[in-house]
Image (cartoon, grey):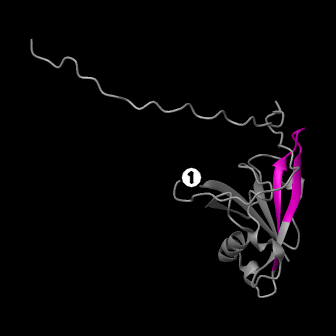
Amino acid sequence: MAGIAGVHRKVQQLPPPPPLPSVRRPPISLHPLARPPTTGPRRSVYICREKTCPLLLRVFTKVGSHHTKEDFAVRGNEPKNEFQIYTWKDATLRELTDLVKEVTPAARRRDARLSFAFVFPEKQGHLVVRPVGKTYSYGTREIDDGKALAQLGFQIGDYLDVAIF
């Protein structure tokens, strides 16, 4: 009989991995539109943009003020001044300001001030327009320039409303 008999390899036995620390998670809401609580310290977010798929951000601009929640009440009948951006949750308000300036001429003024707000449904399903930060068109005179979408509580599916003053 031809074959290999009696050949054994010595396999190194590794110790078992240490047990994972128990992580206390917040209770999960059963409502599909509920947002997680935003209590506690916020951590800066870093996303590998080469390995992470971007998200579609729908941006609505208006000169003089933010849109009202009634402007977004009917799905498919949102305000007409919309443009769409593929970006990541670690995008800063400064990056978004530069993208808005490419599309909206009013944002290119030297003294233009941009106010950002998220539009999202609350637990009962009613829309909320929540201001999250301000930037200037040129220069870094505001501290909100370096804030990322994830730090501000952005969730995929939220709209971004930009008021230009």
Answer yes or no: is residue 67 visible: no
Residue 155 higher or lower than 143, as above or below: above
Q: How many numbered marks have been drawn onto this rendered protein structure?
A: 1
At horizontal 66% and vertical 72% (from top left) the residue drawn is 99
- Up/down of 106 relative to 57, above or below: below
How packed mark 1 is, by other alpha carbons closer than 10 Å (few <14, some 14-19, many 20 or more), is few
Where does residue 133 sit, x and y in percent of width and height? 84, 67
Q: Is residue 38 magenta?
A: no
Q: Give the residue drawn at x 75%, y 50%.
A: 155
Q: Identify the residue at horizontal 87%, vertical 44% (top origin).
A: 122
Secondary structure beneath disc 1? loop
Q: Where is residue 150 in the image (x, y as percent from the top left)?
A: 74, 56
Quadrant occupied by the C terminus: bottom right
Nearer to the camera, 10 or 148: 10
105 with respect to 54 (left or right): right
The x and y percentages for residue 4 are 17, 20
Relative image position of residue 84 (x, y in whole percent)? 65, 60
Q: Residue furthest top?
A: 1
Looking at the picture, does residue 36 appear above or below residue 111?
above
- The amino acid type found where label 1 is placed reads Cys
Residue 118 in sight here? yes
Query: Magenta stretch: dominant SS?
Result: strand
Q: In this view, does 39 lie above or below 82?
A: above
Image side of residue 1 versus residue 121, left or right = left
Q: Is residue 127 left or right of residue 4?
A: right
Q: Mark 1 points at which residue?
A: 53
The boundaries of the magenta stretch are 113-132
Q: Which one is in front, 120 or 155?
A: 155
